[in-house]
Image (cartoon, rainbow, N blue to C red):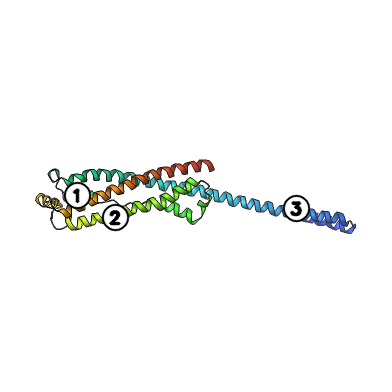
Amino acid sequence: MIKFFRKIRYDLMENNKTVRYLKYAIGEIILVVLGILIALQINNWNEQRKLKTQYISDLKTIKENLEKDARTIARNLKNGNRNAKEFKAYFNADSLVINGSSIIIKIGQPALFFDDSGYKTAKSKNTLNLIQNDSLKNLFHDYYFRQIGLVNLYANQLEQLGKELKRYYLESGHQTEGVLKKDIMKKLMQQGPFLDYLEMYNNQRELTLEWLKMMEEFNSNLTKTIDIELGQIE
């Protein structure tokens, strides 16, 4: 092809057809420019296609993480609400079931682990910059920066209260084979500081559960919004 165009140029120059040669040269330049623009456009299209493919993949990974979080939240809400209900019985010495191990279990708070690996990976690769949906952007921010942070804060405070309660009262050498003696437990139930710790702990647990319930709603909304986004771009 190059030899063909070169031959045309030589023929025009040899025949002193200057005007036609200039027109031909301009036309050749235009063809070269068009070729470059088309090549750039194809390259840009390929890059956009790769970004879109990566964006879809990252959204699906984040959705999988959210589904995992949803199971963690549901499990903790179920156990937490049950323990909070049973825990209130410990404020009534007459109906108290004397079992030190049981009390410690109900005080114990399972570690909350939320999987944000997919979101962090997508952020590091800037693929989430493709988001055009403002609602999705806001939900990402609320869930990964606000909700997770607050739930972890309250859960950590709850864990600290539980440690203090167990250290000062339930692990103070009054146990026999893991079971608190009835008379010791009744004595503890008459102590103001012990009751204060119980009340503080239960209030903190209920506050944590409230935020966890709110987080469950954010999780559901974010998952649904990701589904809508995937439906529009796939």
Q: In this view, does 46 lie to the left or right of 162?
A: right
> Does residue 223 appear in the picture of this structure?
yes
Q: At 40% across and 45% down in the image, what residue appears?
A: 218
| Mark 1 to mark 3 CA distance (whole Å) | 83 Å
Viewer-side label of 3, 2: 2
Residue annotated with mark 2: 157
Q: Which of marks 1 and 3 is nearer the N terminus?
A: 3
Residue 233 coordinates in the image, percent (x, y): 54, 43
Helix, strand, or loop for circle 3? helix
Q: Alpha-carbon distance for marks 3 and 2? A: 70 Å
Q: In which quarter of the image is residue 168?
A: bottom left
Q: What residue do we see at 19% from left, 49% from top? A: 103
Q: In the shown orientation, is residue 75 left or right of residue 98?
A: right
Corner quadrant of residue 166? bottom left
Tell me the number on the disc at residue 31: 3
Q: Position of residue 106 (x, y in %)?
A: 22, 48
Residue on which the image places disc 1: 103
Query: In the rendered structure, which amino acid carries the disc numbered 3?
Result: Leu
Amino acid type of the residue tagged 2 in the rendering: Gln
